[in-house]
Amino acid sequence: MKGLQAPAALDGLQKGALGAGVAGLLLCALGFFTNAEQLYRSWLFGFLFWTGIAIGCLSITLIHNLTGGLWGLVIRRLLEAGARTLPWMAVLFLPVAFGLPHIYPWARADVVAADALVRMKTAYLNAPFFLARAVFYFGVWFLLSHMQSRWSDELDRGVNYLKTSRRLRGLGGAGLLLMGLTITFSAVDWAMSINPHWFSTVYGVLFMVGQALSAMAFIIVCVARFGGEDPLSRVLRKEQVHDLGKLMLAFVMLWAYISFTQFLIIWAGNLPEEIPFYIQRLQGGWQYLALGLVLFHFALPFAVLLSRDLKRNARTLAMVAALVLAIRVVDLYWLIAPDLAGHHGAGAPGLHPHWMDLAALLAVGGVWLTLFVRELRGRPLLPVGEPEIKELLEARAS
Amino acid sequence: MRRRGTGTPDIHGVMAEFNTPHDVVEAAHRVHAQGYRKVDAYSPYPIEELSHALGFHHSPLPLLVLLGGIFGLVAVYGLQYWSAVIEYPMNIGGRPLHSWPAFVVPTFDGTILFASLTAVLGVLALNGLPEPYHPVFNVPTFALASRDKFFLCIEARDPKFDRDKTRDLLRALPGVVDVVEVEH
Amino acid sequence: MAEHAPSAKRIQSETDALIAPGHTLASITEKIASLALKRRTPLGWFVGFGISFLLLQALLYTLAVLLFKGVGVWGINVPVGWGFDIINLVWWIGIGHAGTLISAILLLLRQDWRTSINRFAEAMTLFAVACAVIFPVFHTGRPWLAAYWLFPYPNTMGLWPNFRSPLIWDVFAISTYGTVSALFWYVGLIPDMATLRDRAKSKAWKIVYGMAAMGWRGSARHWHNYESAYLLLAGLATPLVISVHTVVSLDFAAGVIPGWHATIFPPYFVAGAIYAGFAMVLTLSIPLRKAYGLEDFITMKHLENMAKVMLATGLIVAYGYTMEAFMAWYSGNPYEKFMMANRMGGPYAVFYWLLILCNVLAPNLLWIKNLRTNTTFLFLISLVVGVGMWLERFVIIPVSLHRDFLPSSWGSYAGTRYDWSAFLGTIGLFLTLFFLFIRFMPVISIFEMRTILPEGEGGEPKS
């Protein structure tokens, strides 16, 4: 079907993203020669944020395969485009792989020699196994996003609807199982092990929810930007915007729930092996970020999204989504940066953001967005093989 | 069959019976367009278009529930703060007197409890329930309003109400099965 | 629109029938109302009610003995101070959660299939909460003396409850949950009470149902506010139901006992609650639809959807077990490691492996569609899950307590006959209430069933 390509406005976005990415990469190169250790750490931060959006896109696609609903059909191609960037993110993972000793204490021989607890954990936390697991995660994500787009394309071409949609449902079930495990263990590997002493059983869930929220907010911003233009405008109704808003509200609440209960349990237990995590994050300037998270990661979006009218208005919803996306950056920073600075527990350094944190965020983000737009433009923007979409397009045409 | 005074019987209104939801919605539209405002319709299940057709506004219930919730939030947090910090300060397990992370939990429950109570008492109050007696039950077929029939009633207190004209208007509606007077 | 809207709707109606074809507003109303209104009570009802009522006597006897002799008649002692009582509390509360989930969350998600099962699932919630609260209340030994440290009221001793304690959170959470569930259930019943009032033949029942209906007359004004209230209650009940099992999980997680203190407890307890609750809904609905010929309303689609929810929540629970085991090792904490080794290889290891069999392995059979749509199999697997979730709480509570930090304070635990009679007795209470409910109340929400009829049969006009 013609006329279902992504709107021309994407050209400008792609150019802008590419420019930002190149600028960011140049800054990172400069950073590499001035302070390579800081660059590796900042790079991890940028990498985790944008990869998180891509992973969230894949998870939401798979969830939608199981639940169905028009809201997900309307944004399916956006989600798939996000998921299809994941193989490329493996390339952006390389700096992390090369900088292991600069990021993770367990990768440094002197730390391992001096610390019995870390030595015990090296059965799991060691460079070859760590890298092998990363290869496995990316392999699973590649496979899932590949199969998802392949069968989704088959639906577009009208290949046996019932059989293909059953396959997609099956992929949803089995895929989510794999996503649960890969997200959890990648979160443990890439983020939690920055401080190899600390552990929390709910950490993986926290990442799942955070990634889904980032992806949802990102998609809402996209929908608000391109929803008024052909071809999305042909199928997008207030009801779908409303549904996306409800989902974002649900993820905001879920994030607050997981974050608060983790805090409450560790606060109530007050055990020396756990509580330093929060002590460190509630002093030295970090407490202001924590307060910001309470206000802008939960209270404000929650209060605004309770209103039915605001959820049905794509513009106001996108403003909330943009705020959520911005505060997601802060949340990730608050979660990993205190440990990246190298010392743990009380007496740790305070909040000292480095310019390279922003440079890495810009570099990875520019590259990621370029890839996203590229994937988006490669395929029709609507899954025309889905009967519900077909119906809307025909009703519009007649 | 009470009568007020000696003149005409004082009636509650005139009621029309319909077989389909479509007919009653259409009737509501027409009656509303004619300028009748003291109108109510009766159906076995909620029909959103019916309240649109009768020109009902947003229910005030969400606002009431929000206020009820805020009351519960403040009240339960206040109770905990007052009893644990001011009235009965006690060192338990070395935790601060003002242990806000712990206080969040009962506060949440209090918010939900008061909001829910407001929702239930609110819907009863707004609907005027419990109401032991209502004239519409005098209509013999009205028991079918809780089965498969749809009714529309123009009440006598409407300024435009005229016993004969209103009845004729209802009789002329499409799909009407029967029109009866509703006695007090 | 209706003419050239071919595929989507058709595909849906072929595979997803939520109500058998041929029903009208009148037939739905008469069929469901007649279950409550008919004069003759089937013999099977008397048999079921009789057995349940006998079991209930066991509960009353146990509680009488307990009040006379003290909580020592239960097998709890140092170091296992929480045994069957708290296991049963968590088990029953969890079972209740499916009712609220079906009535509130699925309503918000606009899942029409909730409609024919929400009424009795909500009733199940209420009865399960009633069974649950018996245990912590009587666990206090002298409940009438416990009031001052459980409830915040000005008393002559000038004492106030300790709000930093998860046990007080429990009091707030469970009492709020019981109240809100009852309100939600009653609000949902009002229009159906009016239906029964209008259908009842005898004067006495007309008065009883009429009082319950409070003068409801199905006016557009009524419905207008009613819909708003019902959605608001659903919106309030949803976070509440999640918070209740969260608070129950905090009873354990806020402490420092290895095996209890884990940050994953809240979400994994909530998933486990829904898991056990859906199992119970299946356990009840499969015989119910058969006995009362409700196959038209509780279709295979409903059963299959519930089976899918069970599969999904079962996998989440399995994820919880995996994380517990992995982190016990990863933490490097010797007590955590010992706790896990003790679960898997200690004196109660058989319960752990039975739990894995019941909760993790068995439900994976639900991936197979043929099994998922076989009522006998579903009934059996729901019983297996019910047992598995009880074992889960056994593994968490006494098995963590019997060997904690100090070997000198290790002990062992077994339920006494009063533990068993109390547990079986609450099953009797639950079933007694349930039998009374299905005899005198509409087991399916009549007015909501009317709304899912297609338009041609008198259903709502679809714009």
Image (spheres, grey):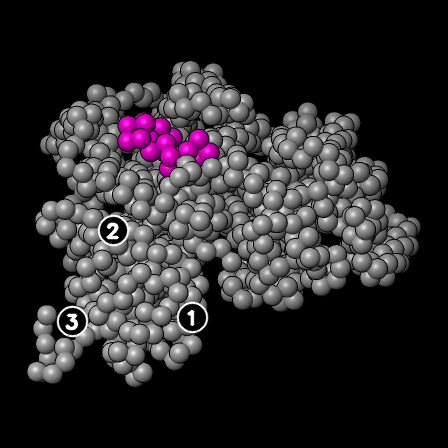
Kindly identify which chain the residue marked by label 1 belongs to: B
Q: Amino acid at mark 3?
A: His
Q: Quadrant of residue C157?
A: bottom left
Query: Which residue in the structure is indicated by mark 1?
Result: B29
* Residue B133 seen from this side: yes
Q: Is residue A61 magenta?
A: no
From the viewer's side, name the closer residue of B23 and A390: B23
Kindly identify which chain the residue marked by label 3 belongs to: B
Q: Residue at x 27, y 66 (%)?
A: B179
Instruction: Return the x and y of residue C260 as percentages of the image width and height.
Output: 44, 34
Query: Which residue in the structure is indicated by mark 3?
Result: B184
- Tell me if residue A194 comes above or below residue B5 in the rendering: above
Residues under numbered marks 1 and 2 in contact, where contact means CB atoms less than 8 Å apart: no
Q: Amino acid at mark 1?
A: His
> What span is in magenta?
C281-302
Q: Amino acid at mark 2?
A: Thr
From the viewer's side, name the closer residue of C152 and A383: A383
Q: Residue at x 51, y 65 (%)?
A: A307
From the viewer's side, name the closer residue of C229 and A201: C229
- Numbered label attached to residue A29: none
- Numbered label attached to residue C195: 2
